[in-house]
Amino acid sequence: MALQDFSRRSLGPRVAAVAALLVVLAAVPAMAVTTVSTAPDQVALTYNSGPLQSKKFDACVGASTRAFDGPFDKHYSYPASQRNFNFSGDSGSDSDPFTIVSRDGIEMSVGGVANFLLNTDCRTLQKFHELIGNRYRAYMDGGDVSDGWLNMLNVYIGKPLDTAMDRAAQKYVWRDLYNNPATKAAWEKEVVEQLPILVDRQTDGEEDFFQNFALTISKPEPPQSLKDAVTAEQTQVAQARAAQAKAQADRLAAQAQIFVQRAEAAKIAERIKVLGIEGYLRTLAIEKGLNPWQPSYGSAIVSPANREAP
């Protein structure tokens, strides 16, 4: 084979490769950077993800920040403001109400809201993302929380909260949880104390991924049949108290009447002492509008029955 023919055949693929490389290099400036812009209530994580890079953590991005990174880098945003887990069962809530069991074995329904903060310390947030967030795709979708975030909450907040409420409720009978404000306050206090411990146990890490818990819990609701029984009982108690109050009022009225009669009798007795019985009776007759001096048939006036016929 001639040397000239060999050179042409060898240079052809090389030229094509060089041309392709030049095309790639020409396109690189257009995709040389990626960017992330966080809102005032967001933070973000940046991970290297280029075809020639190890996929690993790069940096944290603070709130209200725009960052520019290398090509193919990925950014994952998380909320930095207070978050909540709504288990009221209302429209838009994150979960149905939970069921607790009282000491006397009664199932009760409980709704409410748990507020908390995601720990956005850079290294802690990185561990949260790599252990939990990335697995559930819990990072934010634009400015909104994702379905993955809600799924994550049900596992890492909802289940520990359900457990904490149920454990604490088993110390009290259902009537006290339902009707006694002091009992409900004591139960809530224990739930708040136990929740962070159970959440940390669920995350199985040394860091506190969730912080600053606050709970608003509605009154535990027993089955309707028991609520109806309580209502009927309260009605009976109210009726009994009303009857007791009436009897007491009647008794006091009778006592007052007796007191008045005794005072009147004492007054009459004093008047008799002064006037004598005859004088008192005549005075009483005059007071009543009667004539106390009736005709006397022993004088000039003759009784009609003793008159002689003409």
Image (spheres, helix red, strand yellow):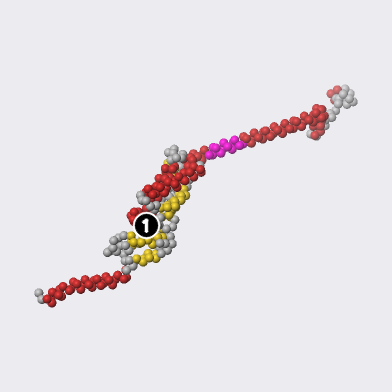
**In the rendered image, which quarter is residue 48 located in?**
bottom left
Tell me: residue 189, above or below residue 281.
below
What x and y, as percent, mark residue 201?
A: 37, 48
User: Which residue position is annotated with label 1?
Assistant: 123
Q: Residue at 35% of width from left, 54% of height from top?
A: 132
Secondary structure category for the residue under label 1: helix
Report the side of 73 relative to 263 (left or right): left
What x and y, as percent, mark residue 75?
A: 35, 62
Magenta stretch: includes residue 247: no
- Quarter occupied by the C terminus: top right
Instruction: Between residue 229 and residue 151, name the one nearer to us.
Output: 151
Give the farthest residue toward the left.
1
Residue 238 visible in the current orientation: yes
- Quarter occupied by the N terminus: bottom left
Instruction: Between residue 220 and residue 296, name the one nearer to us.
Output: 220
What x and y, as percent, mark residue 297?
A: 86, 25
**In the rendered image, which quarter is residue 285 located in?**
top right
Q: Residue at 41% of width from left, 64% of height from top?
A: 65
Q: How many numbered badges does the structure rendering display?
A: 1
Report the side of 166 relative to 309 (left or right): left
Q: Residue at 20% of width from left, 73% of height from top?
A: 15
Instruction: Between residue 278 and residue 275, name the one nearer to us.
Output: 275
Tell me: residue 158, above or below residue 14.
above
- Residue range highlighted in magenta: 234-246
Q: Residue at 87% of width from left, 22% of height from top?
A: 308
Residue 133 visible in the current orientation: no
Tell me: residue 16, above or below residue 158.
below
Report the side of 5 relative to 40 (left or right): left
- Residue type, mark 1 in image: Arg
